[in-house]
Image (cartoon, helix red, strand yellow):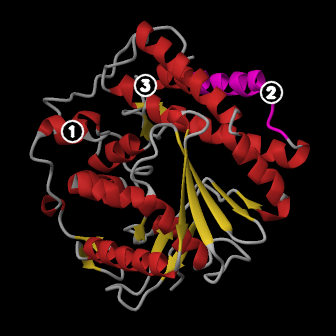
Amino acid sequence: MAALRPFDRPFPEFGYSESRWTAFQRCPRAYFLRVYQAWQGWAAPAGTASALAYRLKRTTTMPALLGTVLHDAATTAVDAVLREGRPPALDVMMTTARDSLNAVWQAARGAHTSYLVNARCPRGTMLEEFLYGDEPTGPSLARYRDRLAFLMDTLWRCDALWEEVRSAGSAHVFVPPPFGAITWRDPRLTVGSVTLFAAPDLVTRNPSHIVITDLKTGRGDGVVDQLLTYATALADGLLPNVTATMPMSGQVVALGDGADSVTRCGFDADDLAAARTRLVENINVLSARQLDPDANVPQPMVTFRMRTDVRDCARCAFRGLCHPQLYPLAVRQTPSGGKAA
């Protein structure tokens, strides 16, 4: 019998990422909906739980969209620095970022009335704000415009980052794909292996060590575990020519705090060993929720508990599935006008 293609599997491959672990800690039910219920929702009949979960999983919010636009701008800037020694002009970067933001805004505004009910899941990005009836107002859009301008200016002025890219050179600068992953193994795992997702924003290699950079549009607090997960994946084969014996360090560029807000931390062998132990522990917690670890068959959804205070659900994309009376999906027939930025 021929092996199933990845997307033909009845259940997804078992995977781990820091975002999945955070989602599980915040709300096991939302984790179940995102990982299991949404699986194959792209082919499920419109209106079914699987189709709705998949469509809601694909949504984003205005703050998250700002982050995506900034990360795209950073990637473009890295390419320009490697080619020309400097990032593009600020007004060019700003125009591109604003156009990207507006393109998503306009596409979502025109499609939100049918996004949840179309027989085929529409392409493109849908903004959660439209689906739940709390579309940003004029004043809030003005704040997003101002925020975008501040973040782009901060990114453009990250001189230390651009100098690091220039010094490393194109042969030693890596921008991993958004869904970079490796098959990860450890004898302490209760499953044979796990797909470890790790996509640092930027990795540079100079003669002395590897530097892992994580860009944040907000504050840079609480990201050491994320950096160490990246370091573990790099040491275990995420990128070519990087090995566990190479000294590594991490840095968080918190764009929301200004161009000079860079937090740096070095990693030694003990740090990486502790990171591996933490990953094993977290992965084993998730694998304990499986009925069949080999096929990644989960326990029933009811065993993935909801949060006890429903007010905590107010910013969850799946709130319309879990609490339709409190958070109805408002699919309006008359989209309002305006631009995002």
Q: Earlier in the sequence, mark 3 or mark 2?
A: 2
Dot 1 amino acid type: Cys
Most foreground residue, 260 or 306: 260
The answer to which quarter of the image holds residue 285 is bottom left
- Viewer-nearest of labels 1 and 2? 2
Instruction: State which tag comes first along the sequence, 1 or 3.
Output: 3
Q: Which residue is mark 1?
A: 313
Which mark identifies residue 227? none
Q: Counting residues from the N terminus, which is met first, the one under dot 1 or under dot 2?
A: 2
Q: Position of residue 174 (x, y in %)?
A: 72, 60
Q: Nearer the viewer, residue 236 or 327?
A: 236
Q: Which residues are magenta?
A: 86-103
- Magenta-colored stretch includes residue 80: no
Observer-side mark, 3 or 2, equals 2
Give the residue furthest to the right.
Answer: 84
The circle on residue 112 is 3
Q: Where does label 2 land, which residue?
A: 89
As rendered, which of 47 and 149 lies closer to the eye? 149
Disc 1 crowd rating (10 Å Cα; few below 14, some 14-19, many 20+) is many
Is residue 101 rendered magenta in the image? yes
